[in-house]
Amino acid sequence: MTAGQPLHTDPPQPQRARHHSGGPPAALDAGVVPSHPPPESDGDESWVWSQIKAEARRDADAEPALASFLYATVLSHPSLDRSLAFHLANKLCSSTLLSTLLYDLFVASLAAHPSIRAAAVADLIAARSRDPACAGFAHCLLNYKGFLAVQAHRVAHVLWAQSRRALALALQSRVAEVFAVDIHPAAAIGKGILLDHATGVVIGETAIVGDNVSILHHVTLGGTGKAVGDRHPKIGDGVLIGAGATILGNVRIGAGAKVGAGSVVLIDVPPRSTAVGNPARLIGGKKGEDVMPGESMDHTSFIQQWSDYII
């Protein structure tokens, strides 16, 4: 294998995937794919993986041009973590950062840290349930660069904690080059995360992002200058951050808060409130809502009338 050459399995044989014992799952209706495992499921991970394989079989049958890719990336693997490791390794390899090295690194990290696998499953469910453009779990796994960037970051975060910082930073650099998402390995990211579109997302070293947060493209969670120490934003659970928003400094965005597109936030935002504008101002919120904005993806409910919408 030459340097940087993508990993390969045995020559793709898409037809073999249809003859496992017990037969393949029933064909899925493209318009009817559950967004969350049923209560009787034996676990989110196994349920989501079965959905991914069924979707991949369906797509391989419908589009022969993708059959070899789907077999090599999904159908030839025994588990979600192996498929994810294989796909990330091929996406992120270079002439000097070999795919075999990356595959072994991802497989070892996913095996040693079940919390990373659980977070990946939560992220898949988040994308499928929150993004109307998400065609299925397999679509997210294979094509959503925001999802892939976050999974690679989780491994880089483990490396950083193990003081393997040179490798963690090298992985961060490749993720930024390939996916246009720049997350420092030291940043702490929760589960159920959706980076919608993801292009241009920047998250600094001491940032913390809670669970069930949705972040759109060109969002910056950055510092304010050359200050050292704890200098980046802390994002609470269930927060929604609109496209192009910039949040700077060691400020706190409270649980269930909403930051409007294009806003510049320099001070704390209380829980369950909405901040918009440059500089951002609070314009109230819906404190009685049951669903957090990060899960509802509701960007505009704060506008009650045209007088509230100032250009």
Image (cartoon, rainbow, N blue to C red):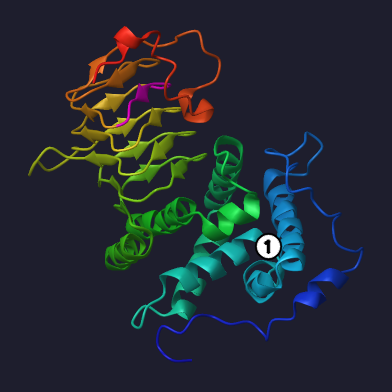
Q: Nearer the viewer, residue 43 or 219?
A: 219
Q: Where does residue 268 sit, x and y in percent of width and height?
A: 24, 21
- Which residue bears the numbered disc 1? 79
User: Disc 1 on helix, strand or loop?
Assistant: loop
Q: Nearer the viewer, residue 43 or 158?
A: 43
* Residue 71 appears in view: no
The reply to whether the magenta stretch includes residue 293 is no
Q: Nearer the viewer, residue 132 or 100?
A: 132
Q: Which residues are the magenta region?
A: 255-261
Q: Residue at point 66% right, 69% down?
A: 70
* Residue 277 appears in view: yes
Q: Residue at point 73% right, 52% down?
A: 51
Q: Residue at point 86% right, 54% down?
A: 26
The reply to whether the magenta stretch includes residue 257 is yes
- Judged by its main secondary structure, the magenta piece is loop
Residue projecting furthest to the bottom = 1
Query: Measured along the vertical axis of the image, is residue 171 above or below residue 120?
Result: below
Q: Where does residue 263 sit, x and y in percent of width and height?
A: 25, 28
Q: Residue at point 40% right, 8% down?
A: 304
To which quarter of the image does residue 229 belong? top left
What residue type is disc 1 on? Answer: Ser
Q: Where does residue 161 sit, x and y in percent of width and height?
A: 35, 54
